[in-house]
Structures are given as C-alpha cells and as structure tokens.
Image (cartoon, rainbow, N blue to C red):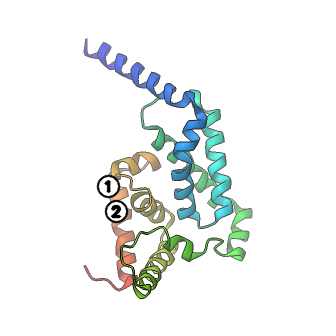
Amino acid sequence: MEEIAGNELAVEKREQAMLELADFDEVVRVYRPRILRFLLSSLTDRDAAEALTQECFLKAWSARHQFRGESSLSTWLTRIAVNLMRDHLRSRSLRFWQKTRGSALDVMDISDWVPDGRSSPESLALARERVAGVWRTVQDLSAHQRTVFVLRFVEEMELDEIATTIGMNLSTVKSHLYRALGIIRERMGETR
C-alpha cells in the first residue's frame, strides 16, 4: 500500500512539473533574472552570462520532457546553468580571451546590487568600496568555493539546495562555503 501511495505521489509531482513547464514563456520570465544573476556573479562577464542564460533556457526547452519533478524547477534550471558555466570555463579557446579581456563587468555595477540604508555620500562610498573588495576576493576563490558562495549569498539558496544543484555532498558544500568565508574575512581584515 505504501509503494502505491509513493508511486501516486511521484506521478502527481511529475504532472505538476509538466504543468509548470507548459507555459515556457512564463518559466523564462520568472527564472531568467535568477539564472542571469547567478551566471553574471560567477563569471563577471556580461556577454558570456547573457549567452549562457539563453543557452540554459534553450537546453531546458529541449529537455523539458526529461524533467521528472524530483527537484524544483528553479533547482533544475540552476543545475543546467552550473553545468554550462563549467563547460564554458573549461573551454581552452575561451580561456585565452578571458585572460586578455579581464573582467567585462564593472565592479561598481556589482556594488549597486547590495542595498544600503545609509544615506550619506561617505557611507555610500565606503559601502561600495567594501562590496568591491569582497567581489575582488570572490574572483580569487576556487571555482567550487565561488559557485557555492554565489548560490548562497546572491541567490540565497539553502545549503541542501546548493548541494542538489551542483551535485555535491552537503558536507562538501559546507566545507567550500566555510573556506570561502574564511578567505574573504581574512582579506577584508575581519576577525571572527
């Protein structure tokens, strides 16, 4: 009896997932900002982030029949984006251009993402300088540490969702996040 109930639940989840994917324009409208923000934060190259975001949704559209509903739609799309980002970073021909171009994203653009309730120009300048410092440090993290950091603090994903999204053990995700935060704190001159 338990097995039948489990199968019915799986079928119900699959049907719900298919309903979500039925209006793909809506899926793109809802999830595109999140995927773009993740890729932009990870790559700091607006052109590459835009291209990979578009490719993410093309892959999702092509593979929509394979979505089983075992995870949320957001997690599934983010996993596609993570895999595309990894492929992009592995590409030898793109590495040359990454080294020569530097960062196409202005650090000041990133600092505008962080809301600041203080209103004085001095406070705003200090906050922007601090955020810019954090993002410079984030770029020096290992690929895994940077991915976990961005998913946690930019996308505000829970640790177990990050583990599912990038296909890592939860304890490994925690370890990467712990090390990333330690490096950032050390370089920013903070003590625990």
Neighbour tally class for label 1: few under 14, some 14-19, many 20 plus, Cα within 10 Å:
few
Residue type at the position of mark 1: Ser
- Per the rendering, the mark at residue 175 is 2
Circle 1 sits in a helix, a strand or a loop, which is it? helix
Residue type at the position of mark 2: Ser
The answer to whether 152 appears left or right of 84 in the picture is left
The relative height of residue 190 versus residue 25 in the rendered view (above or below) is: below
Cα distance in 3D space between marks 2 and 1: 6 Å
Residue at 39% across / 70% down in the picture? 180
Q: Give residue 188's quadrant in the image.
A: bottom left
Residue at 54% across / 63% down in the picture? 42
Q: Answer yes or no: do the residues labelled 2 and 1 have beta carbons within 8 Å?
A: yes
To which residue does mark 1 refer? Answer: 171
Looking at the picture, tell me which residue is in the foreground, 89 or 190: 190
Q: Quadrant of the C terminus?
A: bottom left
Neighbour tally class for label 2: few under 14, some 14-19, many 20 plus, Cα within 10 Å:
some
Residue at 38% across / 52% down in the picture? 157
The answer to whether 130 appears left or right of 5 in the picture is right
Q: Position of residue 86 (x, y in %)?
A: 58, 55
Residue lying at the far bottom in this picture: please name it.
122
Q: Position of residue 22 (x, y in %)?
A: 56, 27
Circle 2 sits in a helix, a strand or a loop, which is it? helix
Q: Quadrant of the N terminus?
A: top left
